[in-house]
Image (cartoon, rainbow, N blue to C red):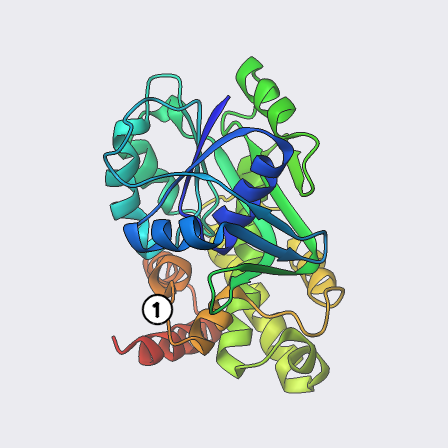
Amino acid sequence: MKILVVGAGAVGGYFGGRLLEKGEDVTFLVREKRKKQLEATGLVIKSVHGDAVLQPSLITSGQQVEAYDVILLSMKAYHLEAAIADCMPYVGPQTMVVPLLNGISHVNKLVTAFDEKNVLGGLCFVEATLDSEGSIVQTSGIHDLVFGERIGEQTERVLKLAEVFDGTKSNFVLSENINRDMWHKYLFIATLAGVTTLFRSPIGPIREDYLGAATIKDTLHEVAAVMRSVDAPIAENIVQLNWDKLHSIEAGMKSSMQRDMEKGLSVEADHFFGYLLGIAANKEISVPTLEKIYANLRIYDGQ
């Protein structure tokens, strides 16, 4: 399969790089500045799972226009509209678009831009960032990409895609219920991002402080309540599952949103929390912790 990775940042560069390392036909659609950087240095991965220096195929928007079999979308939500416009010429009737963004609201935007059948579900768990030289630094044991048909079937095309993804140095997992998995990830990452940005701390010190732990629990309950109000397919015990998960991950783990704040970059406040608060207001659900998290991010972003 011909694979187009939109963006070669921490997420797209890591998973696309692992596929390229395996020998798959991978091209990266990047901005001119990133293209020049990668041409000079190669795609450099520094990872606890093994380092790599790769020479990727690179294009910028409008170059070498053809339909790809698979497109991986790995940008931040605030770059989604520009990314849709950039990759539109590369989407054909049979193209599978696999978004790796956090949250849910982007799915409707992709379906509107493309066709319902083009858009699969997807998510990833990876602690990765770009260093000052543009290298991808991946620092934890978790490096999972989960994908699947939103219709919940194991179709011929998604099984073929699973074969292509198999055998890399990262974990590509074919989900039996990607819609549930995306909502579950949303709840987990909204909580992790919310509390780590609120307290400007990795998860360990927050969960060890009794008020920090209470904030974690309040966030979990509020997000779950909002999701249940729109009949999201989340497990009955999802709060306990995520509480346990947040207490099992490495104490030094930071959310990507916290890392963005440390670099002075924009954050996905509206995509993560504005969306949830909109539902809460419509459903008249009290979410005081989410309001504080959202206010913190808005003030940081100067909104």
Quarter the C terminus occupies: bottom left
Dot 1 corresponds to which residue? 266
Residue appearing at x 31%, y 75% in the figure: 301
Percent across and percent down for residue 70 are 45, 27
216 or 201, nearer to the observer: 201
Q: Residue at x 69, y 54 (%)?
A: 142
Q: Which residue is drawn at 71% across and 74% down?
A: 251
Image coords of residue 128 (percent x, y): 57, 60
Q: Which of 140 and 33 is in front in this view?
A: 33
Instruction: Determine whether 275 is above or below 158 in the image.
Output: below
Above or below — where is 201 with respect to 185? below
Residue 47: x %, y % from top left: 66, 57
Residue 291 coordinates in the image, percent (x, y): 40, 74
Q: How crowded is the residue under tag 1: few (<14 C-alpha within 10 Å), some, or many (20+)?
A: some
* Residue depicted at x 31% and y 28%: 90
- Residue projecting furthest to the front: 40
Say which quarter of the image contains residue 136.
bottom right
